[in-house]
Amino acid sequence: MLRRAIGKFIRHPGGMVGLGLFLALVCIAVFAPAIAPYDPLRVDPIAALTPPSAEHWMGTDTLGRDVMSRVIHGTRISLRLGVISVSIGLSLGVLIGVLAGYLGGRVDGILMRFIDMLLAFPSLILALVAVFALGPGLTNAMIAVGISAIPAFARITRGEVLSAKENLYVQSAQALGGSEVTIMVRHILPNIIAPNIVMGALMTGTAILAGAALSFLGLGAQSPTPEWGLMLSQGRGFMSLAWWLTFFPGLGIMLTVMAMNLLGDGLRDVLDPRIR
């Protein structure tokens, strides 16, 4: 089964492109200090707003900091933001979805009304509300984006649990006297993880985009952190004078989101039984 899924994924061109881009971004993030030609925080006022050249491949910003070095280090921050945010949303969303779907009744009603309340807000607005409550900062932005991801994971998990608990292996475990916790953890959870893996890959791109939006608004990463959204915010006033200040961070966001979407689509085509 696993070998067949891997073989099918290898034959999926979009998924392989997404995986290749993702692995390249991970390598850049891991080896950022070795790859970056300069210290991303080093200020050189004499070299301020230098256009792309042999010395500074992506130019310099208003303080003379090397844009390429800041974009490279920004890869590490953006990937960490996406992974941590999605991990928060995944863990809490799956917990809520499993409890609501398996226990049903009043527990289902209370938990899903809470999820409906979160769904009443668009995800970015929900993240804005959360970060306003928590305060600006990169860590709080991760928590806020994670909170905004909870409803998506909770609803898809609940639907999968409602279907899975009608299967014979669950009914057999119940007949043998298995506890509710044991049935949920050992029998149901492993069989509903595939849709959440797909959703996690897709949501990582969305989380990176949302984190960049919060930083752009001044509610996420704070200066002098080399974060792509913050770099866009700092360069927006110089677009006609220094196009490279916004072009390269924007390109980093685009490639990362595209990589996660392609990877998520490939995983969905391989893991979704309805497509198989």
Image (cartoon, rainbow, N blue to C red):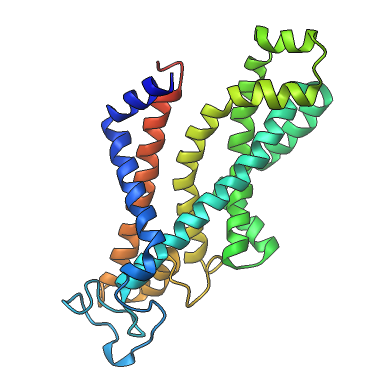
Q: Position of residue 116 (x, y in %)?
A: 68, 35
Question: In the depicted view, which residue is nearer to us: 4 or 271?
Answer: 4
Q: Outermost residue, front direction?
A: 3
The quarter of the picture where the N terminus appears is: top left
- In the displayed structure image, the side of residue 243 where residue 79 appears, left or right: right
Q: Position of residue 197 (x, y in %)?
A: 51, 34
Question: In the depicted view, which residue is nearer to us: 111 or 96?
Answer: 96
Counting labels gives 0
Question: In the depicted view, which residue is nearer to us: 125 or 142?
Answer: 142
- In the displayed structure image, the side of residue 95 where residue 65 appears, left or right: left
Residue found at x 70% / y 61% = 133
Residue 268 visible to an observer of this rendering: yes
Residue found at x 61% / y 25% = 190
The image shows residue 199, relative to residue 183, as above or below, that is below
Q: Position of residue 45 (x, y in %)?
A: 33, 91
The image shows residue 160, relative to residue 138, as above or below, that is above
Q: Quadrant of residue 95?
A: top right
- In the displayed structure image, the side of residue 159 where residue 79 appears, left or right: left
Q: Outermost residue, bottom direction?
A: 46
Residue found at x 32% / y 71% = 36
Q: Position of residue 47 (x, y in %)?
A: 27, 88
The image shows residue 239, relative to residue 267, as above or below, that is below
Residue 166 visible to an observer of this rendering: no
Residue found at x 25% / y 71% = 58
The quarter of the picture where the C terminus appears is: top left
